[in-house]
Structures are given as structure tokens and as C-alpha cells.
Image (tube, grey):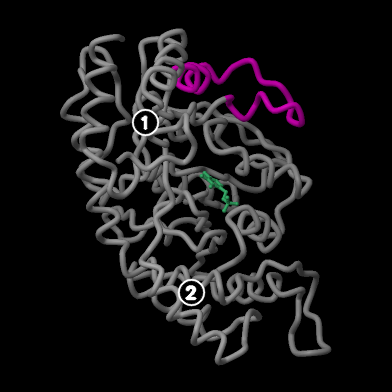
């Protein structure tokens, strides 16, 4: 029997990992006994410590209630003003959070091979209003952080990485979360490690970490003392408990995704399709399977036909490019981002996806496109 989300979708593009319910219940029972549901509780503290150990972080970790809050807190904690150089090829939150915080996104085109911001184009986009660079490690592939760091130092800019896809990803220096002034991630249900809703910030700067901790809790510095402005960015004990349990499964989640990913790569016809380039010197975490078709017409018709004929869901991820949003200034360049975004589809990938589905999808795509 094929498990279905709805009658139409037989194979979803993603599926949240759920641990054995007894394990979660066990954690909930402890919370019930303690009667401590939020406000920097013991489960949250344990989650922060466990993630930090699991990923061998050099940074401090500050968990929050979602990845978008993490982005907003990052901009506030670094006192960003004016313009921020960013990528047009990312999830909407990468741009919407900037605009929400009164910052102006300035887009720089991406690279054909790994879909990340083209670091060689950053310098020419810098003006006297620029205060930061915000780059996404697209689909878990790290940016050229050495070059970005050099540019930031030269122009005295802050660097923030949207590492929402990067749980478990490493480069030669260790966890990708250690990069930049601040890295943020998301623990949303569809990410490969999740707390249902959740996120975190990572920084090696103690004063910034302290500031973020105050800001996520209204600025509370004691019951009646406030140290600056804050918001409510706290993660609850109930959410943290899901993280504690899911963390036990993260190795097997990544291993399982890896085998599905590799099967796609082996079976799909390289003459017809292009893939994101994964560098050899990284520990990759297999968060998505993006596929580039020859053109937009083929990508759209593949999406429709896979769905109509087989109930297979795919996603135009990321589409549209972020400079097309109606609340940002239009930008007619960004040709590579525009091109990639027009012909990319993410194929179904989640832990324990049945390899027969992967075979079916590959056979179908190879023989029809
Ligand atoms: C998921 C995601 C976010 C937003 O995270 P939430 O936890 O859903 O708020 C931001 N950026 C990227 C690249 C994402 O994939």
C-alpha cells in the first residue's frame, strides 16, 4: 500500500520525519511532570547542548521559534542599516526578512554550477550604504566563504549566512554553521532536522550571542530589567523535545536520503539533465534533489505530467527569483538566476523514500524529456 497525503498526491516532494511516537511521549511525560513549558527550559538547554556537541560547533547556538525570526534577529543584533547584498535565488524569507526589517536587498547574480551567489560580482554592487552580505548556502552547498570574508573585511561589512538547508553539512573547516558573523538555520518540519517549527542562530562572537539571547526574550535581563529592545523568539519545551528525539535519528535520516539521492544521480540521463555541482571537499547532507531541464517548457510539462499521470509531486524551487517580488525594486539583469529558476524542479526526496518511486520517476523523465 502506498501511503498518501491526499488522494491525488501519491508521492510527495517532501515528507516530515516523524520518530516513534512512544519516544516523543516519553519526553512529553517528563515535561508534564516538570510543568515547565517554555522560557529557556531544561529541554531547550539540552537541545542546544546536544546540537552543539553533535555538530562539533565552535559557535554558540541560540535556538528560536523559526528560521525567519532567526534572520530578523541576526540583522537587529548586527545593527544593519541601508543596503544588504543578497542572492535572488533562495526561499522568500531570505528577502522578506530584510524588507520587514527596513533593509534594502541588492541582488547579485548566481553561479551556473552551484546556484550560490557569484562572489566575483559582489564587489561591484557595494555602495556607501552597504552594511552586509546575506548569502544562502543553496541546497546545502557552502558558498565561497573565504572570498566573501575577504570582501567583507575590505569594506567593513557584516556577513550573514542563511544556512537553512545545512544541518550536518561541513566544509574542510567543520560545520557550515560556524561561518560568517552569524549563520542562521531553520528547524521547520520539512527540513532534514526539525522541531516542527524552529530555528537557530550561530555566532562565535560572545557579545553578539549575548545580545541575541536578550533579544529573543523581550530584552529581559532579569524580571524587571530590560537591556534593549527585544521580541518573543523563544522555542517551547514541546518543540525542543521533538528536536531531542529527532536528533537521535539524524545519521540514519542523512544516510537514507543519500542513497535515494545517489540513485537519482545514477539513473537520470546526464545527456538530458543537469545537476547542482557538489564539491568533493564537503560533507554533503542531501537536503534536496534539484534537477535542471533543458528549458522552462520541459520543466513545466514534466511537473504537470508527473503529477497527472503518477501523482508525483515536484516543486519549482526556487521560483520566482526574489527580485520579482512586488515589494522589492525590479532588476532586469540576474540572467543566470532567472534561467536556473525557470527550468529547475526539485524531485521527491525524504528519509525512507521507496527506491521503486525513484526508479519510476527516473524512467519516466528519461523516456519523456
Ligand atoms: C526554510 C527556509 C527559511 C525559513 O525558515 P522557517 O523556519 O520556515 O521560518 C529561510 N531560508 C531558507 C533558504 C529556507 O529554506
Q: Secondary structure at mark 2?
A: helix
> Who's the residue at 29% across and 9% down the image?
368
- In the picture, measured across the screen, residue 155 lies left or right of residue 151, that is right
Residues packed near mark 2 inside 10 Å, few (<14), some (14 to 19) or many (20 plus)? many
Total labels: the figure holds 2
Which of the two residues, 281 or 248, is positioned nearer the viewer here? Answer: 248
The residue furthest left is 266
Residue 259 disc label: none
Q: Which quarter of the figure is the C terminus placed in?
A: top left
Which of the two residues, 143 or 325, is positioned nearer the viewer here? Answer: 325
Q: Name the residue beneath numbered marker 1.
A: 347
Q: CA distance from mark 1 to mark 2?
A: 30 Å
Q: Which quarter of the figure is the N terminus placed in?
A: top left
Residue 55 coordinates in the image, percent (x, y):
34, 67
Which numbered disc, 1 or 2, marks the residue that appears first in the sequence? 2
> Who's the residue at 48% across and 69% down the image?
204
> In the displayed structure, would residue 117 be above or below residue 41?
above
Which of the two residues, 101 or 303, is positioned nearer the viewer here? Answer: 303
Task: Report if residue 316 lies within the magenta region.
Answer: no
Residue 354 coordinates in the image, percent (x, y):
25, 41
Residue 112 coordinates in the image, percent (x, y):
39, 23
Task: Report if residue 335 lies within the magenta region.
Answer: yes
Q: Name the residue beneath numbered marker 2.
A: 241
> Who's the residue at 21% across and 34% down the image?
356
Q: Quadrant of residue 138?
A: top left
> In the displayed structure, would residue 13 be above or below residue 103?
above
Residue 146 coordinates in the image, percent (x, y):
39, 48
> Who's the residue at 20% across and 18% down the image?
269
Residues packed near mark 1 inside 10 Å, few (<14), some (14 to 19) or many (20 plus)? many
What residue span does the magenta drawing correspond to?
320-343
Amino acid at each position: 500500500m502506498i501511503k498518501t497525503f491526499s488522494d491525488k498526491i501519491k508521492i510527495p516532494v517532501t515528507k516530515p520525519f516523524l520518530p516513534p511516537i512512544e519516544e516523543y511521549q516519553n519526553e512529553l511525560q517528563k515535561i508534564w511532570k516538570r510543568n515547565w513549558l517554555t522560557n529557556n527550559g531544561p529541554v531547550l538547554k539540552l537541545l542546544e547542548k546536544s546540537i552543539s556537541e553533535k555538530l562539533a560547533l565552535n559557535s554558540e547556538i541560540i535556538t528560536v521559534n523559526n528560521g525567519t525570526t532567526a534572520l530578523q534577529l541576526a540583522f537587529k543584533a548586527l545593527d544593519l542599516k541601508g543596503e544588504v547584498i543578497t542572492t535572488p535565488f533562495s526561499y522568500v524569507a531570505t528577502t522578506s526578512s530584510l524588507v520587514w526589517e527596513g533593509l534594502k536587498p541588492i541582488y547579485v547574480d548566481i553561479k551556473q554550477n552551484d546556484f550560490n551567489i557569484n562572489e566575483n560580482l559582489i564587489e561591484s554592487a557595494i555602495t556607501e550604504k552597504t552594511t552586509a552580505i546575506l548569502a544562502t548556502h543553496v541546497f546545502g552547498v557552502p558558498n565561497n566563504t573565504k572570498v566573501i570574508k575577504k570582501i567583507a573585511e575590505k569594506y567593513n561589512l557584516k556577513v550573514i549566512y542563511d544556512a537553512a538547508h545545512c544541518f550536518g553539512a561541513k566544509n574542510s573547516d567543520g560545520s557550515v554553521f560556524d561561518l560568517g558573523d552569524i549563520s542562521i538555520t531553520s528547524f521547520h518540519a520539512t527540513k532534514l532536522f526539525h522541531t516542527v517549527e524552529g530555528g537557530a542562530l550561530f555566532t562565535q562572537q560572545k557579545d553578539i550571542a549575548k545580545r541575541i539571547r536578550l533579544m529573543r526574550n523581550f530584552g529581559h535581563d532579569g524580571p524587571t530589567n530590560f537591556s534593549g529592545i527585544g521580541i518573543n523568539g523563544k522555542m517551547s519545551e514541546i518543540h525542543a523535545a521533538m528536536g531531542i528525539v529527532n536528533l537521535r535519528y539524524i545519521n540514519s535520516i542523512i544516510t537514507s536520503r543519500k542513497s535515494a539521492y545517489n540513485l537519482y544521480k545514477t539513473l537520470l540521463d546526464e545527456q538530458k539533465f543537469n545537476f547542482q555541482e557538489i564539491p568533493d571537499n564537503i560533507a554533503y547532507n542531501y537536503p534536496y534533489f534539484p534537477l535542471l531541464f533543458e528549458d522552462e517548457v520541459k520543466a513545466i510539462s514534466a511537473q504537470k505530467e508527473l503529477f497527472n499521470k503518477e501523482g508525483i509531486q515536484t516543486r519549482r524551487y526556487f521560483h520566482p527569483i526574489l527580485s520579482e517580488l512586488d515589494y522589492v525594486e525590479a532588476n532586469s539583469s540576474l540572467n543566470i538566476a532567472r534561467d536556473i529558476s525557470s527550468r529547475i524542479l526539485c524531485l521527491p526526496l525524504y528519509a525512507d523514500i521507496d527506491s521503486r518511486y525513484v526508479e519510476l520517476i527516473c524512467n519516466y523523465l528519461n523516456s519523456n524529456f
